[in-house]
Image (tube, rainbow, N blue to C red):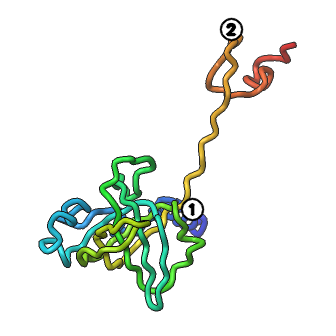
């Protein structure tokens, strides 16, 4: 019986485990945001930052991978906002090693924690863009969100319509109702 209780306790506590690492979930103290780092790069160089957004491009080099990320504001747990048209810009994240471009595909949400190294100019199409860049220490690729299904509601509800029972046939709504034909 003690083993069963211990096993249940372990399973209960494992269900409370967070998905993202601690540096991703909490912002570093006095970390500059993207606009501050771009405005005064010399003052913020070498500081730890936590930025996130949506991957725009993945470039693999011989010893590292460079991610071009369209920045988005971060929510409480460190996940980039789903729909945020007010982006502060783009940044480059330099991750040591190889990242598979099929997994780290454009459009996936990512949050990085690392050292702000300064500004670097690269092309975005034909435009020369000045990127803030980060040497990444920790990153988290967020799982894609499943779309929530929306059910079409009948505009002509019967008098006993109950929205809690969903879009099911009327004789499946409640066990106390008999077949209704």
Which disc, if any, is residue 175?
Answer: none
As helix, strand or loop, the secondary structure at mark 2 comes to: loop
Which residue is the site of mark 1?
8
Rate crowding at label 1 as few (under 14), some (14 to 19) or many (20 or more) other CA atoms within 10 Å: few
Quarter of the image with the C terminus is: top right
State the image coordinates of residue 159 (x, y, percent, origin top left).
68, 8
Residue at 47 percent of width and 59 percent of height? 16
State the image coordinates of residue 41 (x, y, percent, origin top left).
17, 71
Q: Residue furthest front?
A: 126
N-term-proximal mark, 2 vs 1:
1
Regarding residue 76, the answer to whether it shows in the image is: no
State the image coordinates of residue 171 (x, y, percent, origin top left).
80, 21
Query: Depth check: 97 or 166 in front?
Result: 97
Quarter of the image with the N terminus is: bottom right
Which residue is the site of mark 2?
159
Q: Residue furthest top?
A: 159
Residue at 47 percent of width and 91 percent of height? 62
Query: Depth check: 80 or 71 in front?
Result: 71
Q: CA distance from mark 2 to mark 1?
A: 46 Å
């Amino acid at each position: 019986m003690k083993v069963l209780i211990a096993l249940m306790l372990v399973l209960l506590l494992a269900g409370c485990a967070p998905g993202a690492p601690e540096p991703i979930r909490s912002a570093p103290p006095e970390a500059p945001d993207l606009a501050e780092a771009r405005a005064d790069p010399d003052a913020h160089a070498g500081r730890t930052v936590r930025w996130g957004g949506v991957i725009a491009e993945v470039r693999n080099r011989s010893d590292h991978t460079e991610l071009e990320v369209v920045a988005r504001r971060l929510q409480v747990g460190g996940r980039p906002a789903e729909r945020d048209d007010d982006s502060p810009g783009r940044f480059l994240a330099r991750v040591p090693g190889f990242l598979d471009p099929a997994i780290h595909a454009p459009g996936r949400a990512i949050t990085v924690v690392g050292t702000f190294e300064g500004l670097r100019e690269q092309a975005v199409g034909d435009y020369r863009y000045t990127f803030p860049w980060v040497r990444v220490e920790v990153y988290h690729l967020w799982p894609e969100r499943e779309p929530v299904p929306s059910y079409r509601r009948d505009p002509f509800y019967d008098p006993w319509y109950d929205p809690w029972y969903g879009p099911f046939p009327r004789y499946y709504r409640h066990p106390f109702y008999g077949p209704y034909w």
